[in-house]
Image (spheres, rainbow, N blue to C red):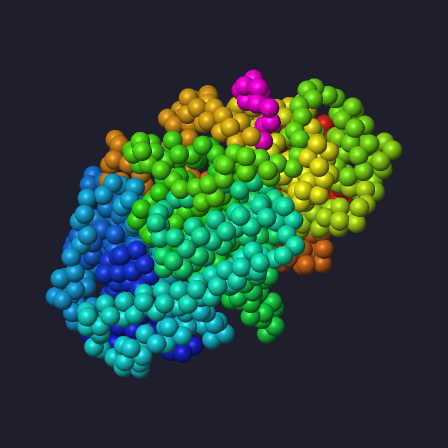
Amino acid sequence: MVEEYYARTSNHGYETCVEHLSMAAAFSGGFSGAFGQLEEGMLAGLFHDAGKYSEAFQKRIRDPEHVTKVDHSTAGAAKTGEQGHLYAAMAIAGHHAGLPSFGATVDTSQDSSFQGRIKRAREHPDTINCTAMGEQFDFVSLSSIKADTTPRDIYTMMMRIRMIFSGLVDGDRLDAEFFTEDNMSREEWELLHEIKDFFGGASLSEQQAPSNDRLLQAAEMVHRKLHDKAQTVIAHLASIVENRADALFAKPDKTPLDEKRCKILRQCLEEGKSSGFGRNIYTLTAPTGSGKTNASITFALEHARTHGLDRVIYVIPYTSIIDQTVAVFEKEFGEEAVLPHYAEAPYRLAEEDDLNPTDVRRNLASENWNAPIVVTTAVQFFESLYSNKTSRCRKLHNIANSVIVFDEAQTLPPQHLKPCLRAILELVDHYQCTAVLCTATQPELLPVLRELRNEPNYEVREITAMSDDEIMQFARTTVIFTGHTTLEELAQELASQPQVLCVVNTRKEAQSLYQLLKQGAVGEDGLYCLTTLHCAYDRKRLLDEIRARLAAGKPCRVISTSLIEAGVDVDFPVAYREEAGLDSILQTAGRCNREGRRPKEESIVTVFSTDGTIPPFIRQNLDALSYVKERGFEDVNEPAAVHAYFTYLLNLRQGGGMRLRNVTDPLDQADILRLHSCEGDNRRQMPFDTIDQRFHMIDSLTVPVYVPVNDEARDLCDRLINGERNRMLFRRLGKYAVQVWPKHRDALLEAGKIMDADSGSTDASYVLQDPQAYSSEFGLELEISSGEGLWI
């Protein structure tokens, strides 16, 4: 018989099973306490490594030559499952390889589902024998913890499993790092020390485990201390925005635009302090240039302080506007309070002994979102909620009890609109969240929310409650429709404007128009072509140049695809927009006369059409625009025009106007909600793995090509070519990536312009080899004559 059971080994020696399971139980339970599942989370943490009590595992951990893989998760899953704790059992089963599907009773031991794994384990009873663990922990007392048998729909059950899974993964990983890492320092370390002392310090590694009551007390302590600390920080941050607002209100020399911004800010401040509508779904409809970012963070922090919420999460559609949002927040609250989490996040780990404390902290916090203000992308946020992967799900429990601001809400992808809104409703209804749908052009989402809730009278609350007249006071441009033009005629018009923005629908058109201007009288000085063929590093550099030239009054002509529209802080005296959706037109208008320094009548946004290819993604948007034009609105900036546009667009989309084969719901084209339902073969199967594979916010087969545009990029690309593979390397490479379609990838490979750094792997990484194939003008050079237009 084994005298002591070990869970892992490191330079410090062995960590016992008692120690690891007790610590994991405390933190898994504490994390799940944020959404009322403390006991279920505690059980998940306690039993997740029950299989490590097996003789096979103990032999493996003691003998380096014993390398046979041992399944140490199924034992705990079987034990908790027998007691009816489905949520804990599923979380335990997935805490290494990811959440499996639940499966069906007809599954055999050969199936990879939860049901199949349990049947396979029962064929080898020694692998799920928890007798040894029962000699240390009080199974009799633990069996008194009642399973949650409240009837729920499958969607709610699956989201709860993901959340408990998240708390388990984070608790397990934190204790593992705490035991094994010498040079790592997390926010949670102090609390880990405190909980270990609560269990008795060094004596925790002895045979006798903490009692059931002691485990629950430790979990409650984790939950309470994390929440109390978060509240202290939120109160401090809320006082900063309140003081800033008071200073703005008291400013004596406010312009008329300042007065309008102050009114919106005051409404956000007052609504944030109000307890009337509670934790719910809000809209914040604030015109471009109205101070939306400052107003929304003011509401979010005041609301969090009023309702006892732990953090604010900003969900932004495009990485092109995240940097400026992060910069605003860092300036106001300090770097310590803000966590940027997206592919091109600027922080990195310095080499060897030269560790940057802020970058280290942010890197670690990005794994579990333990930060007061998180700024992330819609891709990261929603794909994590529908993932089954340990790395992506680890942070989910920290979404609970948060204010979530969805910036530019009109950009939620229509093909996934229902899954996105269903997730938001679930977070509000069951995880004590408040959601804010924030935009200058509020989409028509209420009918979909009502359908998903099956409540025809369901309402959301508008924070600003501005009248149509007040909204129109922010209109600083005049939009005119001029009809068809040629690129040559358009180039002549643009050449006559010293500072001008022109947004077109495809990269091909942008490059062609740029060439016409370059070859004409304008030349290269102050001429820019912005598309996603530039890597993010260069896009940011070019935008900084553009802002500097605009501020200095120098010539500045920018041809861009839609990437410049949503939220990018630039201010042109005039703008041109190729016909697209009304929301796109108004977003382009938001880059014109942004600060209201010129009369509205002189700040013209010209909307034109060409013979260029119409991207399929915007055809319905164009139909909705035609509908609005036919209605004869005097000004398309009018709220009534925007409402008519989005109402008609929603009807088009719901009416099957997408004309897609084998799609049961145009607003849920990947069938995500059906996979969360009891329909047909899905009943009780809970196919977590299938959902993870199907749900992608950007339905694109593009692949990244990494471009060595500077010394850092060259070093990173060399490391990739030499075989280095780790998460931090790919994060640092992110800002040097250009996404290309497979056919363009194949052409570049055939021409020797790029190389496959992974020699044909399914997850291949491509690196630019020919420096002539990337320019500061166009970015990655694709044949204009053969490249298809891409709407982006």
Q: Position of residue 258 (x, y in %)?
A: 61, 49
Task: Report the side of 525 relative to 696 (left or right).
Answer: right
The N terminus lies in quadrant: bottom left
Q: Residue at x 53, y 42 (%)?
A: 286
Q: Residue at x 19, y 41 (%)?
A: 105
Can you see residue 362?
A: no
Q: Residue at x 31, y 31 (%)?
A: 456
Q: Position of residue 210 (x, y in %)?
A: 22, 74
Viewer-nearest residue: 138 or 381? 381
User: Which residue is situated farthest in the bottom direction here?
Assistant: 202
Viewer-nearest residue: 43 or 781? 43
Viewer-nearest residue: 187 or 256? 256
Task: Report the side of 126 relative to 654 (left or right).
Answer: left
Q: Position of residue 135 (x, y in %)?
A: 16, 71
Q: Is residue 620 magenta?
A: no
Task: Report the side of 777 relative to 209 (left or right).
Answer: right
Q: Position of residue 352 (x, y in %)?
A: 59, 71
The C terminus lies in quadrant: top right
Q: Is residue 631 magenta?
A: yes
Q: Is the residue 417 above or below the residue 187 in the image?
A: above
Q: Is the residue 365 above or below the residue 689 in the image?
A: below
User: Which residue is situated farthest in the top direction here?
Assistant: 630
Q: Is the residue 591 above or below the residue 244 in the image?
A: above
User: Which residue is situated farthest in the front direction here?
Assistant: 252
Q: Is the residue 494 above or below the residue 321 in the image?
A: above
Can you see residue 447?
A: yes
Part of the protein shown in magenta? 627-637
Q: Residue at x 59, y 38 (%)?
A: 473
User: Which residue is situated farthest in the right direction here?
Assistant: 521
> Which image quarter: residue 334?
bottom right
